[in-house]
Image (tube, rainbow, N blue to C red):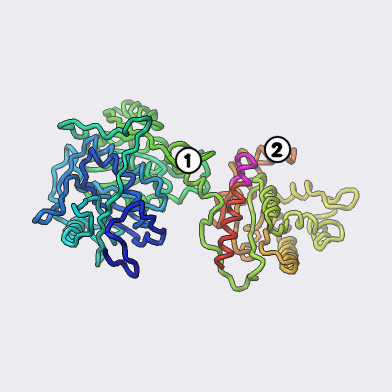
């Protein structure tokens, strides 16, 4: 047994123990894999399952096949040749680890030696951005226990290679390895030859991508690039116009944040390389002008892009690049409306309906009802979402309809609006013609401000009165349905902002069908509104209505269920 705070863990830490989730007590860990490469392929799933029970964030992986922790001498790190077998194993490790969504896995390449590198000594300690608190291993002793001498050698080995937290804990995992037959056959191991040729490496390598929410598919692509690069890796990161066609582009992280995550990962896995990370505003960037580049790494999807790069290089009088193609990693967790490969768009899809940032804590807001501000551009489907939330139990306060009613004859702003804009905005029956008024103010910021200065303060006061009515009726959640929630500065009136997003072309299509106006008028209307991307920056929850209504309702129900959990916690 070994002691861990107030918990005592048994000598064997296996998936079968059913360790509770609270046992994931280590924020970061180092997993030292000692099994032969040919055996590791079949052992990765149980090894990672065991590690995932103990580590909750960053899991570094160090490959050292054949390492012995029972010999009389202290073991040292040695080089592993960068062969196709090693790359295939690392790829499989990332794919197998993808089911553990909480883990940020990083396979360290410091001791993976490529063909053209002159090997430096491995004696120095490498700094890691998230120093491990625990070191884990698949190494097994004959008695199957947590042998102190073995653990001490493991701790000394880890600290001789990497910067670790003080008071490093060590654990021998002892996963349960089961060879399950598929159609009567055992799963294939990695095929090995007696002497496997190393990967062909190159001095300067280039790779590109969006690299949003760095996932295991990205990590496989970057690992291949790092294993092939001897000196420099040039990484192009898509930005601006290149993001316009991306699914759920509003949820793509800012460029600076994507680069920060990318840089941390690269420096962690292979600090010896020179990294150059640049913005990509077109498909090519410096890949078609840099004479020092030798190789481009692509996936099955981007192979055409690699061929196009070489055509441009030939036009520019430069040598073609070696094109190294990798396979796409299949996402075992993909669901409806998600890609089959591990992808950023699937990760963004899974964010829909979830809490993206902590709710506002404001003592001036009433504790009940809990106030949700629901907003979205014209045509986003905001009203249908609001109505579904009402069916789920929310008190629905439609501020858009309220805004239309207050300038009806006898309404609180009728006389002010007529006085400000003239009687030519009136119909024959004395009501304000919204089409005429809209044409007057949209496209003219001065006129629009004149109208909103009249209407918004009155609407805000009426909203507060309605909220009081909801409280009196015992409502626990009140949804303020308002297209101009953010423009009017009403975010201070709510605990959370929920935004409905939709691709612009789909919003225009819906406006044309609903309102019967011209496409030009629809585009002008959207141009005069805060964009979806701007709204998302202020939002706590985001929903998207671009799919079937059932999918939208599922998102709303997911958001509602998570909200109920938050309210119970409070």
The percent coordinates of residue 394 (x first, y second) are 68, 58
Judge the density around disc 2: few (<14), some (14-19), many (≥20) Cα neighbours within 10 Å: some
What distance separates the C-alpha of mark 1 from that of mark 2?
34 Å
Residue at (51% x, 38% y) in the render: 245
Count of labels in the image: 2
Say if residue 542 shows up in the picture: yes
Between disc 1 and disc 2, whose residue precedes? 1
The percent coordinates of residue 416 (x first, y second) are 80, 61
Nearest to the observer: residue 362 or residue 424 = 362
Dot 2 falls on a residue whose secondary structure is helix
Residue at (26% x, 34% y) in the render: 190
Q: Quadrant of residue 216?
A: top left
Q: Which mark is residue 552?
A: none
Q: Does residue 54 belong to the magenta stretch? A: no
Dot 1 falls on a residue whose secondary structure is loop
The percent coordinates of residue 517 (x first, y second) are 73, 39
Residue at (32% x, 66% y) in the render: 8
**In this figure, which residue is indicated by the disc labeled 2?**
512
Viewport quadrant of the N terminus: bottom left
Single out the mark in the foreground, 1 or 2: 1
Vertical placement of residue 280 versus 153, above or below? above
Q: Does residue 551 belong to the magenta stretch? A: yes
Q: Is residue 135 left or right of residue 498?
A: left
Say if residue 443 shows up in the picture: no
Magenta range is: 544-553
Nearest to the observer: residue 311 or residue 331 = 331
**In this figure, which residue is indicated by the disc labeled 1?**
334
Vertical placement of residue 98 versus 157, above or below? above
């Amino acid at each position: 047994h070994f002691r861990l705070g107030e918990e005592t863990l048994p000598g064997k830490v296996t998936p079968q123990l059913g360790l509770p989730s609270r046992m994931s007590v280590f924020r970061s860990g180092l997993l030292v894999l000692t099994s032969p490469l040919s055996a590791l392929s079949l052992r990765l799933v149980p090894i990672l399952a065991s590690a995932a029970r103990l580590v909750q964030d960053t899991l570094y992986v160090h490959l050292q096949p054949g390492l012995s922790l029972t010999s009389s001498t202290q073991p040292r790190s040695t080089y592993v040749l960068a062969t196709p077998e090693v790359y295939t194993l690392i790829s499989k490790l990332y794919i197998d680890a993808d089911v553990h969504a909480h883990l940020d896995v990083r396979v360290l390449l410091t001791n993976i030696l490529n063909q053209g590198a002159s090997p430096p000594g491995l004696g120095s300690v490498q700094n890691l951005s998230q120093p491990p608190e625990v070191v884990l291993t698949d190494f097994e002793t004959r008695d199957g226990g947590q042998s102190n001498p073995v653990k001490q050698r493991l701790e000394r080995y880890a600290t001789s290679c990497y910067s670790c937290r003080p008071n490093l804990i060590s654990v021998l995992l002892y996963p349960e390895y089961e060879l399950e037959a598929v159609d009567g056959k055992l799963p294939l191991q990695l095929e090995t030859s007696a002497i496997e040729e190393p990967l062909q490496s190159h001095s300067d390598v280039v790779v590109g991508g969006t690299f949003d929410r760095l996932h295991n598919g990205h990590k496989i692509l970057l690992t291949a690039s790092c294993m092939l690069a001897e000196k420099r890796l040039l990484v192009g990161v898509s930005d601006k116009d290149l993001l316009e066609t991306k699914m759920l582009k509003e949820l793509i992280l800012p460029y600076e944040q994507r680069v920060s995550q990318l840089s941390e990962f690269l420096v962690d896995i292979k600090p010896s390389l020179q990294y150059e990370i640049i913005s990509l505003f077109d498909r090519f960037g410096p890949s078609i002008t840099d004479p020092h580049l030798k190789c481009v790494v692509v996936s099955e999807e981007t192979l055409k892009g690699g061929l196009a790069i070489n055509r441009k290089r030939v036009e520019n009088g430069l040598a073609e690049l070696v094109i190294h193609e990798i396979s796409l990693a299949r996402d075992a967790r993909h669901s409806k409306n998600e890609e089959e490969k591990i992808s950023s768009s699937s990760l963004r899809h899974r964010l829909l309906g979830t809490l993206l940032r902590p709710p506002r804590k404001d003592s001036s807001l009433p504790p009940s009802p809990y106030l949700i501000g629901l907003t979205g551009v014209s045509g986003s489907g905001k009203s249908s979402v609001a109505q579904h939330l009402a069916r789920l139990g929310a008190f629905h306060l439609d501020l858009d309809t309220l805004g239309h009613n207050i300038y009806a004859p006898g309404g609180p702003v009728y006389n002010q609006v007529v006085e400000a804009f003239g009687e030519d905005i009136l119909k024959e029956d004395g009501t304000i013609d919204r089409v005429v008024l809209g044409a007057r103010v949209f496209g003219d910021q001065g006129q629009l401000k004149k109208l909103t200065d009249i209407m918004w303060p009155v609407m805000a006061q009426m909203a507060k009165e309605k909220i009081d009515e909801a409280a009196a009726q015992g409502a626990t959640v009140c949804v303020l349905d308002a297209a101009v929630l953010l423009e009017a500065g009403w975010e201070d009136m709510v605990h959370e902002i929920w935004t409905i997003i939709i691709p612009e072309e789909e919003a225009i299509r819906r406006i044309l069908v609903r309102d019967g106006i011209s496409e030009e008028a629809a585009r002008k209307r959207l141009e005069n509104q805060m964009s979806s991307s701007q709204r998302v920056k202020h939002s706590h929850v985001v929903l998207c209505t671009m799919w079937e209504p059932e999918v939208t309702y599922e998102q709303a129900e997911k958001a509602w269920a998570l909200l109920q959990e938050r309210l119970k916690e409070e």
